[in-house]
Image: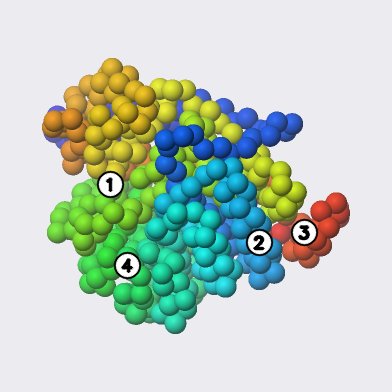
Amino acid sequence: MGFNSIFENLAVRYAHKSIQKSLYNEFNIKILNNETYDKKPESNKSYMLYAHVPFCHTFCPYCSFHKYHYEQELAKIYFENLRTEMRQIKEAGFDFSSMYVGGGTTLINEAELEKTLILAKELFGITEISAESDPNHIAPESLKRFRGLIDRLSVGVQSFDDEILKKVGRYEKFGSSKEVQERLKNALGVFKTLSIDLIFNLPNQTKSQLLNDINIAKSIEAEQITFYPLMKSNLTREAIARTLGVSNVDNEREFYELICENFSDYHQNNAWAFSKNVSDLRDEYVGSNAEYVGVGSGAFSFLNGELVINAFNLLDYGRRVKSGKSAVIAKCGFSKKEQLKYKFLVKLFDGAVDIADYNAQNGANLRKDLAFELSMLKLVGAIKQSGGVVKPTRFGRYLCVTLMRDFYAGMDRVRAIFKDDAKIKSAKNLRIMSKDCDTKPQQNEPLYGAM
Ligand SMILES: C[S@@+](CC[C@H](N)C(=O)[O-])C[C@H]1O[C@@H](n2cnc3c(N)ncnc32)[C@H](O)[C@@H]1O
Ligand code: SF4
């Protein structure tokens, strides 16, 4: 191992420890029992709107996103509540130019999603909407109703390898690699951007499996391809080991380099997304927008230096929204220094930090406020500066990938805290309670749905 690699490994380990310190040791979640938190915009700030759709037909072992088993009636009630919360956000004075709909499976109830997106465009100055889907909801006949509403659709494929798809249970649910490829090709051209989401560094994934994923993904000619590094947390570690096995070799860095080499003819949108053409549409609501408002059950917002958490439990969420009470159940503040580090990371992850812009947006003096971090990043060769712009080097991009991966895994700590709260009694019970807000759940009824 060369001197540079030793240095770089140390830097990766140091960065990992440092983000763990921020997200774990200093993660100070305050549950709001008697206090109410109302989301309010600050003047001169722009925000992005995130809407969460927490329903899937079946659950995948590596996925920790907040979700319930789909039931049409539940989803209808949920979408109504989501629209009510959006109206409340409008009344609070927010406006947005972009919206990201995440899940779960956002297209699981097309009529309800359509109503919700139309309302979002009526309420706010939204000019671009991104949504996620699984490969079962991308038939052109279904997608066409969203023309003019959705601009970018990212489809979760995860891998084009049938063996991997079988292990994670997606082969039976979403079809073979060949079938998924066909569906993706048919979905091309319906929206401005079709994006393919893949995961790399799965346990026991070989280099040739990854190269195969890369080649097939490129051959489909989708406008964008995103390669997420496998993120593991206490919520998913066991299920991943059970289905994909355990590997004592970590190929993350090698595989990431391989991906970057093979996408050198693409435009790098951010550290893990590649576009065929230069595009303004980003794949990460976290990446491009340091501040965002989350609506929906279990949605996170990042507002005024605080992580703000909506009720996870569908019933609690519905009751709050219907009664005009804030959907927020908890928040977590970060020190000014932590906020500056986070905002620097998301800009670097996106590809460049314009120092003057950064200083103006954050009331900061980057060179002074993050002097230690900048000199460390320079020392390990992770950043380069030219004029007033800081950019990641090739190694710096990888460092950003690891930090973002840690950041997402850190969010699972929040989900873990509320996991039990998220459980709801039987679907029947939920329907009754949604109509009559005072009815208490029956004891000893089976728990329903939450992941
Ligand atoms: C919230 S999922 C929704 C996608 C859609 N429901 C599907 O199954 O295709 C969005 C994307 O996050 C990525 N993702 C989910 N869990 C992940 C994990 N543990 N590690 C890396 N990426 C993950 C997957 O690529 C997935 O397609
Ligand atoms: S990957 Fe998609 S389908 Fe699978 S559990 Fe997560 S959100 Fe649901």
Mark sitting earlier along the chain (3/4): 4
* Residue 235 appears in view: no
Q: Residue 264, image x and y in percent?
A: 15, 55
Quarter holding residue 384: top left
Mark 3 C-beta closer than 8 Å to ligand 2 = no
Disc 4 secondary structure class:
loop
Which amino acid does the dot numbered 4 rest on?
Lys
Say whether residue 52 is left or right of residue 321.
left
Question: Residue 271's mark?
Answer: 1
**Spatial distance from mark 4 to mark 1, Cα to Cα?**
22 Å
Q: Residue 235, image x and y in percent?
A: 54, 47
Asked if the residue under mark 4 is in contact with the one under mark 3, i.e. CB atoms within 8 Å, the reply is no
Mark sitting earlier along the chain (2/4): 2
3 or 4: mark nearer the eye: 4
Colouring used for the render:
rainbow
**Spatial distance from mark 2 to mark 4, Cα to Cα?**
28 Å
Circle 3 crowding by C-alpha within 10 Å: few under 14, some 14–19, many from 20: many
**Spatial distance from mark 2 to mark 1, Cα to Cα?**
36 Å
Disc 2 secondary structure class:
helix
Query: Is 76 drawn above or below residue 8 in the view shown?
Result: below
The residue to which callout 4 is attached is: 192
